[in-house]
Image: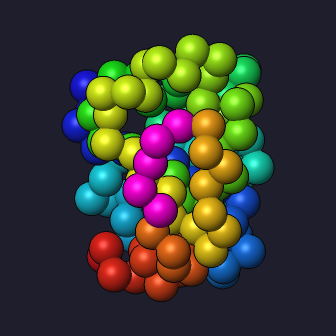
Amino acid sequence: MYKCLIVIGRGVRLAGAEWEIIALSFFYPVITTILGKDLTEFSLGTIGIRGTANHLLDKAKEVYFVGCSMPIAQLGYNLKKWKNKKVYSVNIEPPNGLIECEWINKDAKVWLQEQI
């Protein structure tokens, strides 16, 4: 499937980065959390308990969570599946520690502009 996935959440809206997500979705596959569901029509689906893109998240080797708090409802209850993935949290708040990830302490809009 996809080697790298971008997961966008409500923090993208709070940062005012809606246009950056649209531009980024032309280069990378984008999926959303439930709270980021209406940010772009180019999303491949949502993640979470009733997510439609959980299978994409399971198969990705590298995942960037942008503006997401990464709760258990998004990550799933089997946290062992995250052991062999490179996971990055792009957020102004530190990750919650449920899974091992690299924290990129930046505003979502700033980070997204750097990627385009």
- As displayed, is residue 73 above or below residue 25? above
* Horizontal and vertical percent position of residue 91: 58, 67
Horizontal arrangement in the rendering, residue 21 relative to residue 93 (left or right): left
At 23% across and 37% down in the image, what residue appears? 3
Front residue of 110/101: it is 101
Q: Over which residues does the magenta segment extend? A: 99-103
- As displayed, is residue 41 above or below residue 49? below
Q: Is residue 65 magenta?
A: no
What type of secondary structure mainly makes up the magenta span? loop
- Scheme of colours in the image: rainbow
* Horizontal and vertical percent position of residue 44: 48, 37
* Horizontal and vertical percent position of residue 93: 66, 68
Q: Quadrant of the C terminus?
A: bottom left
| Quarter-of-image position of residue 74 | top right
| Residue 30 at least partly seen | no
Horizontal arrangement in the rendering, residue 91 relative to residue 115 (left or right): right
At 66% across and 79% down in the image, what residue appears? 15
- As displayed, is residue 59 above or below residue 105? above
- As displayed, is residue 105 above or below residue 5? below
* Horizontal and vertical percent position of residue 110: 48, 84
Q: Quadrant of the N terminus?
A: top left
At 47% across and 18% down in the image, what residue appears? 80
Front residue of 74/23: it is 74
